[in-house]
Amino acid sequence: MIPDTPSRAGLSPAGEAELAVLIAERFAACQPLRIAGGGTRVETGSVPGDILSTAAISGVVTYEPGEMTLIARAGTPLDEIQAMLAAEGQALAFEPADMRGVLGRDGTPTIGGAVAANASGPRRLLAGACRDHLLGVRFVDGQGRVLKNGGRVMKNVTGLDLGKLLCGAHGTLGVLTEVALKTLPHLPDRCTLGFHGVTVEEAVAIFSAALATPFEVSGAAFRDGSAWLRVEGLGPQMDYRRDRLLALLTPRKAELLDAEATVALWHDLRDLAHFAGFDAPLWRVLVKPGEAPATARALQALGGAVSLDWGGGLVWYCGPGTAQAVRRVAPHATLVRRGGLDGPTFPPEAAAVARLSAGLRHRFDPAGILNPGLMDQ
């Protein structure tokens, strides 16, 4: 989703029907729209058109704790959903990040924005990404048609793939109005193993050893010379897994964090608190974990700092360097915070993928009015 700016006119339909009429009118007039959720996620370049906010399309449609399914309108604040789930001992397994700190914003993260961005935090390496928990969607396409896809339970798998296309499309295929998600039990006990004074190479070696075990590590991250492993579950079995990991990683000396310290640490790691308060560009880089050390070293050579998540599958880089220089060593880099830097937000797609993407956008948005040019900026 895209942040609001005071220089753009604001449109905030109160419901799906009003949204469909508005988009149909813009389609007929070929007038672009800039889709916004809570305005708290990836920065973009100049996307033309009036801002269309989904904030008023809010509220939980249904929540069935026994079935572990949730249906909510796109503008529903994430905080409300997480509080409701916590009251039933459940959570969103994909652990979406709150990007307000690193982007310097004061908007409200929404469930629609999380799905549109496929926002997935540290637990992705164990539980999967946001799209893996998406059961169904309702959305309005670029012609003003209201479309529904998927279902309310996992066994109703018809059309799940279309929902997965919308998840991560950043509003370029349609404007989400409702999402159905699978929830999971909130694991009551947690601890973290910390290994200090390690290099990027040593951190990835620790991650590789831990993630090759059956001990269900739910977080593996590195920052400022420390590697962190999170273990969650029920008391006795969590203790067993923790002890086995400590034995496996001997003779490395580990710091052991309790549940309270674990929650605080992983909130900070999830939300990139270590890169908040800076003006420098911030990049999100997807790599094979085995390639993380070389990629991190090449990025550090540009003069900035790196951290790792997903056991090395995700590299964050904060620092100088042109878009060309960063993508020369990290082809799959997305520019999350511009910091005055010009250049495309998203990495270029391979020719075959670009043709498929263009075909999908033409199918769902033939006039090109939804976030036009976003993926090319």
Image (cartoon, rainbow, N blue to C red):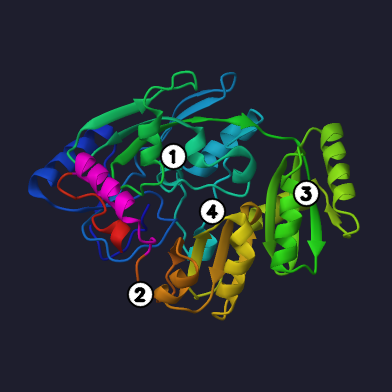
Cα separation, mark 3 vs mark 2, equals 41 Å
Cα separation, mark 3 vs mark 1, equals 28 Å
Looking at marks 1 and 2 on the same chain, the residue that comes earlier in the sequence is marked by: 1
User: Farthest front residue?
Assistant: 352
Relative side of 287 to 223, left or right: left
From the image, tell me which residue sits under label 4: 98
Label 4 environment density (alpha carbons within 10 Å; few <14, some 14–19, many ≥20): many
Cα separation, mark 1 vs mark 2, equals 33 Å
Q: Amino acid at mark 3?
A: Glu
Which label was assigned to residue 342?
2
Say if mark 2 contacts mark 4, CB within 8 Å: no
Mark nearer the viewer, 2 or 4: 2
Q: Confirm whether the magenta stretch covers residue 70.
A: no
Looking at marks 2 and 4 on the same chain, the residue that comes earlier in the sequence is marked by: 4
From the image, tell me which residue sits under label 1: 76
The residue stretch that appears in magenta: 345-365
Mark nearer the viewer, 3 or 2: 2
Q: Secondary structure at mark 3?
A: helix
Task: Specify the quadrant of the image occupied by residue 19.
Answer: top left
